[in-house]
Image (spheres, rainbow, N blue to C red):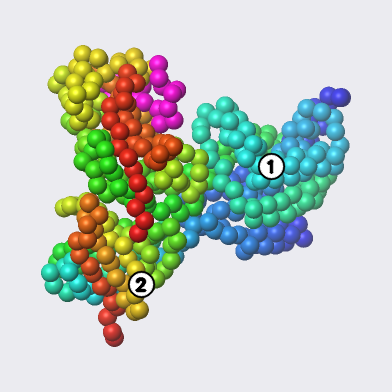
Amino acid sequence: MHRPSTCQRQDALGELGSLVPLGMIGLLIANDHLLKFVFHNAVTGKLSDIAICFLMPLLVSAALGSIARIQARRRLWIGAAVTVVVFSALEMSDVAGAWFVRAVALVLGEHTVLTRDPTDLLALVCVPVAIVYGRRRARAATIGSRSRRLGGALALITGSLALMATSPAGRCDKWSPPIVFNVEGDCGTGGLIVVQADAFIGRLTITNHAALLAPPASGQLSVNEEYNGTACPYTLDQGNWAITYGYCSTPAYADPLPIGGTDAGDDASDGGGIDGGASDAGASDAGPPPDGGAVSDAGATHDAGAPPSTSCQSGYRQCQATLESDGLWFTCSSDTTATLCRSRLTVVQP
Amino acid sequence: MMRALLLATFLALVTTACDDSPCTDSEQFVVNENGTCSSTPQQLTISASNCHVSLSGATSDTGLPMQGAMGSHPAPLRQGGFLLFGDTPSFRLCHAQRVDYRLELSCVDDNDAPVCQAELTEPAF
């Protein structure tokens, strides 16, 4: 493959450096990171797809033009083919979706969630529009200015990042109704609870919390209650949700779980499994609070009060709702992996 | 020409867009509450927004949880099918059902034992 000359490279960038591609990138960023959260409607659901299907052929074409001597027309067709294949695969294939999520996590270090809707494929209409536009720009770029080439370079970088960081309005944009459970067991007082998870990050709201798990003790540092499954709408009745407490394990502060006759009484001495938090960190989706701090946050947490004035050794308790062969169970364990309590959850139909 | 083509494509796509969220429309109306949940009949406002339901404007204790949510098949409030739940001062869960021209709420406590029933009807003008 022949390397492009400096002029050819600049021309390729110049194709991107005009108002429409830059505007599309602005639209993509604004929609993904602002408009979806503010409006969350049919229009915001499609704007990103439109921007992606228009931008991607141009970005691929410009990137190819920067590294290889290929005619603009051929670059654009390659960009169009890549766009159609990638966009369709992400919309229709679970495997492709999983690969994309992993790639984004590797490159950007953030978890993204793909939401699928077959009507998104209509946005592919923008691909031929992008080709027509790109060919016009390719002709104009040969007489383009320096600012246009700089704009093209900027568009190539920000556009690539914006495409990777595209996100839904939340983790799940379908309605996930609250689920009513009857709780029987020794983790809480028992009785009916209502569990809901929010659309944005799957954070749980539990009504009548004490029936499931005792209310937080004063030594509690953080609590993370979250749906960890991948289904959308959420399938809370299938388990995959967890409650993780970080707490002070020094004698002055009680373990948040009211467990008698188990190792709960050993909290002061077991140091809360001070190192367990670190060693087991990857074992759970919810993730225990990291070890070694007075205040620890298990991902998205909401603090349950100010930390004590003196530092404490932290430990954690993790309670997981899991579907087992005989139904849904809520099991709490500590960082020493002992099972502290179990409660059975039965869905109550209205 | 190019701009017109872009604009036409954009408009065509947006108009064919569909939305997964079934609760995009907000609604709110005044109802009279009767039944055993409240000690006296009273008027209050029931509203829904983004699949969440709330009660407001009551002059005294309604005996009903003030918050709730749509069930698995969200519908306009007047069709029922929503839940009201809360744990202050004690846990109470109410299922709303449409019966004729009124909403009937059946409320249970945390033992799933019936606590009270309320009827919500729209005032006649």
Who's the residue at 29% across and 44% down the image? A183
Who's the residue at 36% across and 29% down the image? A298
Q: Position of residue A181 (x, y in %)?
A: 33, 48
**Badge 2 amino acid:** Arg
What's the mark number on residue A152?
none
- Quarter of the picture containing the N terminus of chain A is top right
Which of A57 and A85 lies nearest the eye of the viewer?
A85
**Badge 1 amino acid:** Ala
Q: Residue A286 colored magenta? A: yes
Residue B21 seen in this snapshot = yes
Residue A144 seen in this snapshot = no
Q: Which residue is mark 1?
A: A89
Who's the residue at 19% across and 61% down the image? B115
- Quarter of the picture containing the C terminus of chain A is bottom left
Q: Position of residue A277 (x, y in %)?
A: 35, 19
What's the mark number on residue B98?
2
Q: Quadrant of residue A239?
A: top left
Q: Is residue A188 left or right of residue B8?
A: left
The rendered magenta stretch, by its main secondary structure, is classed as loop
Element type at marker 2?
strand
Q: Position of residue A78 (x, y in %)?
A: 80, 39
| Dot 1: chain letter | A
Who's the residue at 20% across and 65% down the image? B116
Graded by Cα atoms within 10 Å as few (under 14), some (14 to 19) or many (20 or more), the crowding at tag 2 reads: some
What stretch of residues is rendered in magenta?
A279-297
Q: Residue furthest front?
A: A326
Q: Is residue B62 above or below residue A1?
A: below
Q: Residue B82 colored magenta? A: no
